[in-house]
Structure formats: structure tokens, C-alpha cells
Image (cartoon, grey):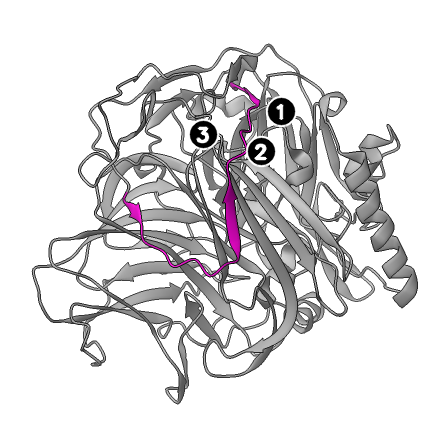
Amino acid sequence: MVSAKTFATWAVAAIAGVAAAPSELHHVARRDCGSKGNSVSQAETAPGGQTSTSGAASSGDDSTCVNSPTSRQCWLPGYDLTTNYYENVPDTGVVREYWFNIENTTASPDGYEMPVQLINGSFPGPTIIADWGDTVIVHLTNSLQTNGTGLHFHGIRQNYTDQMDGVPSITQCPIAPGDTYTYKWRAVEYGTGWYHSHFYVQAWDGVFGGITINGPATANYDVDLGHLFLNDWYHQTADELVSHAATGGPPTAVNGLINGTNTYNDTMGSRFETVFEAGKKYRLRLVNAAADNHFRFMIDNHTMEVIANDFVPIVPYNATQLSIGMGQRYDIIVEGKDLTDGDFWIRAIAQEACSESDAVDDVKGIVRYSNSSTSEPTTSAYSYDDSCADELSSNLIPHLAINVSSEYISTDENVGVMVQDNALLWTMNKTSMHTQWEYPTALQLSQKNETWLSKQNAIRFPQVNEWVYMVIHSPFAQDHPMHLHGHDFWLLDAGYGNFDLDQTDRLTLVNAPRRDVAMLPASGYMVIAFPTNNPGAWLCHCHIAWHTSEGFAVQIIERESEIEYDSDALNKTCTNWSNYVASVDLFQYDSGV
């Protein structure tokens, strides 16, 4: 259902009186990368259709404000925490360039050796590090023996760079074995993201890593410890698991990992460890990179200050535990206790309300206060309710306040299931997505082909700078992490039961939570909103690995007449893929995304 109304201009205001925040980056990035000083300048399309050029100063222009452990609200002259990052982006003139190689190998994250697919031989993969406004270039070579690939930069809005979104069958053909593809995009936001393969279920064989975009923050801290990945883990390949999921239900995780490591059966492997100093404040960038486990995260006897959800800085709030769904990120600050010795458990507890795991209470790491300690902690977890619900919306208040118009166009999406060839498929509006690896949406659009098949599950929005309200209903007693590419979305409402747009008085239009992944409640609904200000073909899907593979997705075709493509790169990749497929007689057996 699509109904048209008038677009109203965004209201923008910065919330005053909030403390500031980030720290010097303290990673060791396992990568082969170099930085080049090419100047890259482009116009960013701002909310409401206004156009601002990178380099335009914000209203909070204070050249004396320098980012430091005591002034994390600052960044560059003219750019700080009050800057509307949807409109104004620093023109740094810096290019961060990376060379990634994906190959088949083996690894033992929990001591049990498994065949994996890794980038540059590391697990998780190398961290992409850039500053707000930098340009990032990633050269991706596929050295896998029998798989295509493609790399999605999760949370990166790809403002006017749809072709760089890295989704085979949507924005590109898969990269064939032996081929190389170059991604280039601008860091128009700052905070914490991650990248992962969007080819089949390859990400959960190890093809993922972190994205850190340095910028201002909403609270002060001393040290940025970087990403803390939370994963479920299986002693089967993802290919074997997805077959099980389609015919026998979701597989049970045998273990879980924190930053790519854990013990198994108390006989092998090792825990993740980090050392705190008394009085120091540490920033941690939490990412749930699991295939199918929702985690509750905590550090025993420590309180977390939460400063961002996904790529959106928020008004800080304190918590002893965090509910984090697949694909979601939270930036937290933890202060070291007044100790010179002591050991505390870090916990990622799989929530049994929506997760299948044999390691519910054993996905752990350790915070130590002494480098020399080897003791196992004896601390106890905080009490918690087993639940897969999101953090309370009342806690997730964006620091940069942007209101949603009450004038909108709308689409209503109903989740369902069907059985085909004895396999379970997920549907949205009675259609299970099935796109073609060899004929992606980008190629179709570049050829001006107006023939859309129902199985492409495309929703077209040609309107310019209007608000879309998307209502998603699910009758099933399972929570689903819904992810939208190409946008942050505003979470206007979510709950149990049914919703229709006659109930708009229930919607939060004033500074609603903003993010790119939110939980669709079991037997419930969610209402999200986004402006049509970024031309492209954008996937919207459940981030449970098996569900995406089984067709739980739609694609949003936004302002298609304005989408620009590099036809040479597109055609070259597709030709190489077609030649590879012909040589091995490859059959596509999932949704294509």
C-alpha cells in the first residue's frame, strides 16, 4: 500500500548540556594498508533536499575546541558534536586505502579446528580505520576456491554511492574467484560499524571485521579499546548450517566467541582478556556479529555508560547490562575500579527466548587489573530477564535531535513463511525474495529495464525528499533484527499485536531513536521512517543469517532515475562472474542476498 502526502522539512536541534567524548585510537590493526593524500570532495544531499558541500562549517564553530580525553565533544574547527552530520561533513582530503584478500584456510577460535574463509588471514578481519570525512578505498581480491563474494559496509549510508554497498544481486554481481573489485565510499558519519560478506552465508565462516570512524562523542574517556565482537559459533560450516535451517529448523550454536576466541568444553581454546587501570575510562565498541544469537552483555561489578547505538551518538545513560541483537552496535565507556588487582568476567549471554545455544553461560572474557594475573574470575553476573527486546526507546535519545514529519508515504509489510521443495522460506508480503546473482538490480537499472519480477520484492519510491513510514508486522513468536541499508531510520513505534496507520497518535515523531538495526517484536510490529534523500537500491532484511538466505527481505528502489553507476566496473564484474559460473555449472540455491 502506498499513499502520498506532502513532505515537511526536517526540524533539527542539538540537545544542550551533554558531556563530550572519544579517545586516541588504541588499536593494532592487522592489515596491509596505506594512506594517500588525494583530496576527495563531493556534495552531500542533506535532509529535506538541501544540498551542502563537504567543508561547510557548523554553527558550533569553535577553533579553540580540540578533541582530547577531557573534550570529546570537539573535533575539527567548525565540526563538533553539535554539527548536523546529515548536512555537514569535514573535507579532510584524506584517502584511507586497504587491500583485502579473502581465502580458504583453517582456524581454531575455540581450540576446535574448522575450515574458514578469512580476510588477510585474520579472525575477525582487519579493522578499517578512518576519520569523519575521509574517503575509504578497499580493494577486495577473491582468492577463494569455489565461492563468489562481496563486501557490505554495515551502517555506512553510502550517500549517493549505492554501487559501493557490496550486496551481490542488488548492487553488483558476485566477485568471481581470481577477480578483484574496488569499493570507494565517504565516511559521512562517525562511530562504530562493521563489514561482512553479503554473499550467501559466507560472513559466518569468518568474512567480517570492524569499521571505526573517529569523530566526536557524547562523553569523555581516556582509551579507545576498539571493537568487541560477540559471535555465536558452530562446529560446522555456514553452508552446512543453512541447509539444516531450511529443512530442520535453526541449528544450535555449540559455542560463542568474544573477539574471535573462547574456550570449549574447558579443555581447549582461551578467553579474551583485557587489562584495566584504576580510574581510566575505556571506550568499547560492541558489535553483535552472530548468525542467530541475541546477547545480553555485561561486565561483572562494572557499570557501562552507553554513548551511541549503531552510528548514532546518543545522550549517555548508565547500564549494568545491554540487550544487543544481530547486526547492532553499542559504544560504551567503562571506568576502571580503584584496584591494583582483581579479575572480572565479561559476559555475552545468549538469550534463550530467541537463541539456540549450548553455551548460554559460557561465552566469556576477562577484565584484569594486573598483567600478571592468570586467575579465573569468581565474580557473579548481574540478574537479568531473558528477553530479546531492544533497549528501552526512552534510553536511546539521539544527541542530534531530528523530528519526523507527520506527512508521509507508507508501505505495509507482512512477514510470513512458505514451504517450497521441502524447505522453509520466509516471506514479506507473501513473496520470498529471490534475486539473480548474474543480473543484479544495479545492472537492471543501468539498462533502464522496467520489468520487475514479483520475486525481486522491489518497492519503488521515485518521490524526492519525502518521508516513508514502513510498518512491518510479524505473527510469529520470534524477534527479528531488521536492518535497512542506505539510511539511518527513525523507530517511531514497536510493540506486540497489530498496528495500522490510523493510530498515528501512538508514533514518536519528536527525536525518535535512530539506528540501522532494530528488533521487530515477537508477534508484533514496528514502524520505522526514513526520508527519500539517497538514490539507490537498498536492501531491508532480517539479520538472522538463515532468514536472509531464506528470502526474508525486500529491496527499496529509491529515486531510481538519479542513481549513477560505473557501468564499466559493473559489467566487468558481471562478465567475470558469468564466465566463472559457466565453467563450474554453479547453481544459486538461496535468496541471492
Total tally of numbered discs in the picture: 3
Residue receiving disc 3: 92
Question: Relative to 449, is 11 above or below?
Answer: above
Marks 2,1: beta carbons within 8 A: yes
Residue receiving disc 1: 410
Determine the secondary structure under disc 1: strand
In this view, the residue in front, 485 or 579, is 579
Q: Is residue 65 left or right of residue 266?
A: left
Q: Is residue 60 left or right of residue 585?
A: left
Q: Position of residue 481 (x, y in %)?
A: 52, 49
Q: Position of residue 198 (x, y in %)?
A: 65, 53
| Mark whose residue sits in front, 3 or 1 | 3
Residue 157 within the magenta-colored segment of the rendering: no
The reply to whether residue 497 is in sight is no
As shown in the figure, which amino acid type bears the numbered disc 1?
Ser
| Mark whose residue sits in front, 3 or 2 | 3
Q: Is residue 109 left or right of residue 216?
A: right
Q: Quadrant of residue 163?
A: top right
Residue receiving disc 2: 471
Q: Position of residue 103 (x, y in %)?
A: 65, 68
Identify the magenta region: 23-46
> How busy is the neighbourhood of tag 3: few (under 14 within 10 Å), some, or many (20 plus)?
some
Residue at (80% x, 48% y) in the render:
573
